[in-house]
């Protein structure tokens, strides 16, 4: 094998986590050098394998663990979206009302601000595998969400509001996690970044002035389908989110 191809494979191995490379990197590189297979096929295999390793799929040694991890991912995404919905409305309250000295426009604004804070805390708790705490915070955030929605003229309008359903669905999906808890993230705070991403890419009040929808939502769905090739948990959790 040419030195250039060997260096190419060595660079591709960087897709794998550092600990993984330290344990198996030399062996993998030696196998690739000896096999001398078509470079295109090996490139795709190394990229996908590295991404799967970084996603932690190597630790899911049974279908049960895979399903519990998928449930955890679904819960995190639902809570992140619910928090994004509250964030878009809380931003208007803070920057357009409170900072301008006009005060709260409606009593329900307090519920929006509380749902935003509770959603962030619930997201951190679930990411850290503190599922009981996460469920309690989710329930609290939902009560505050109901307070913010309770000023609709009729309850039927509350039921069709997209802000109503994510938190109760997340609560129900989290119940099995109490019995078979999967591991939490090494850095739970990184999950907070999912909130601003959801504000921009998913339907929220933030889109009222930008009119990015439904194109951003289509792009998100296409990205999820592509990522399902790498992470099998996306498939079982995506239909729950709908």
Image (cartoon, grey):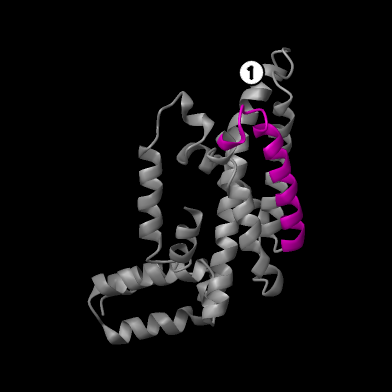
Quadrant in which residue 23 is drawn: bottom right
Residue in the foreground of this view, choosing between 19 and 49: 49
Residue in the foreground of this view, choosing between 193 and 11: 193
Classify 10 Å Cα crowding around label 1: few (below 14), some (14-19), many (20 and above): some
Which structural element holds mark 1? helix
Compared to residue 25, the image places residue 123 above or below, namely above
144 drawn magenta: yes
158 drawn magenta: no
Q: Is residue 38 visible?
A: yes
Kindly report the secondary structure that dominates the magenta region of the rendered protein: helix
Percent across and percent down for residue 35 are: 29, 86
* Residue 236 appears left or right of 145: left
Residue at 65 percent of width and 62 percent of height: 174
Residue at 57 percent of width and 37 percent of height: 156
Residue at 57 percent of width and 76 percent of height: 65
Magenta-drawn segment: 131-156
Residue in the foreground of this view, choosing between 185 and 172: 172
Q: Which quarter of the rendered picture does the N terminus lie within?
A: bottom left
Q: Is residue 130 visible?
A: no
Residue at 56 percent of width and 61 percent of height: 73
**Which residue does the numbered mark 1 point to in the structure image?**
96
Percent across and percent down for residue 135 are: 72, 57
* Residue 224 appears left or right of 61: left
Compared to residue 98, the image places residue 117 above or below, namely below
Percent across and percent down for residue 201 are: 46, 40
């Amino acid at each position: 094998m040419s030195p250039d191809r060997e260096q190419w494979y060595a660079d591709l191995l960087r897709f794998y986590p550092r600990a993984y490379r330290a344990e198996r990197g030399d062996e993998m590189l030696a196998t690739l050098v000896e096999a001398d297979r078509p470079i295109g096929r090996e490139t795709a295999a190394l990229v996908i394998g590295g991404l799967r390793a970084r996603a932690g799929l190597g630790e899911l040694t049974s279908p049960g663990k895979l399903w519990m991890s998928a449930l955890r991912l679904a819960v995190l995404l639902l809570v992140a979206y619910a928090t994004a919905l509250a964030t878009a409305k809380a931003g208007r309250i803070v920057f357009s009302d409170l900072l301008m000295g006009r005060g709260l426009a409606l009593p329900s604004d307090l519920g929006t601000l509380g749902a935003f804070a509770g959603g962030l805390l619930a997201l951190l708790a679930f990411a850290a595998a503190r599922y009981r705490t996460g469920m309690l915070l989710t329930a609290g955030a939902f009560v505050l969400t109901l307070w913010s929605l309770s000023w609709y003229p009729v309850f039927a309008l509350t039921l069709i509001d997209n802000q109503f359903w994510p938190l109760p669905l997340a609560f129900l999906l989290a119940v099995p996690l109490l019995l078979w808890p999967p591991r939490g993230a090494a850095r739970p705070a990184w999950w907070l970044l999912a909130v601003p991403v959801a504000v921009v890419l998913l339907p929220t009040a933030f889109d009222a002035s930008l009119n990015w929808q439904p194109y951003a939502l289509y792009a998100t769905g296409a990205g999820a389908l592509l990522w399902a090739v790498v992470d099998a948990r996306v498939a079982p959790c995506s239909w729950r989110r709908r």
